[in-house]
Amino acid sequence: MKRFNIKIGHFAKGYMEDHRSDGEYVKYADIKGMILTEQQRKEFEAASRPLMEWLSKNCHPHVKVIVDYSRSEMLEGIVNFSTEDYIT
């Protein structure tokens, strides 16, 4: 299991406690997903809508965009097959 030192309150449950060698108390979170405030949800929607509108006007329905902190990538889905047969 990966553990990340994070700001408390940014991620959902699953906290683990630990003490560093210098005695400082540290909390880790078992990463389960972000918790967004209602304001953050509204900001996310406001930021998303212009790109969604641009895609709708300029691309076909099989185009997707992945955005992170340093880049934006446009992808085109040619074929997709999904199965859960091999998930253990």
Image (cartoon, rainbow, N blue to C red):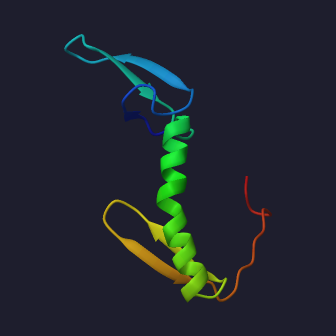
Query: Which residue is depicted at the point 65% across and 89% down?
Result: 78
- Which quadrant of the view contains residue 79? bottom right
User: Residue farthest to the left?
Assistant: 22
Q: Is residue 35 visible?
A: no
Vertical placement of residue 61 versus 72, above or below: below
Q: Residue at x 43, y 66 (%)?
A: 67
Task: State the residue in front, 87 or 70.
Answer: 70
For this rendering, which residue is in front, 64 or 37?
37
Q: Residue furthest top?
A: 23
The residue lying toward the viewer, choosing from 67 and 87, is: 67
Position above or below: 13 against 86? above
Residue 32: x and y in percent read 57, 38
- Whether 51 is drawn above or below 16: the answer is below
Q: Which residue is pictured at 48% across the width and 21% down the height? A: 16
Relative image position of residue 48 (x, y in whole percent): 51, 62
Measured along the vertical axis of the image, is residue 67 above or below residue 62?
above
Residue 11, x across and y down, in percent: 50, 33
Q: What x and y, as percent, mark residue 38?
A: 56, 36
Looking at the image, residue 71 sits to the left or right of residue 41; the answer is: left
Query: How many badges with numbers are in the image?
Result: 0
Residue 53 visible in the picture: yes
Residue at image position (55%, 54%) is 45
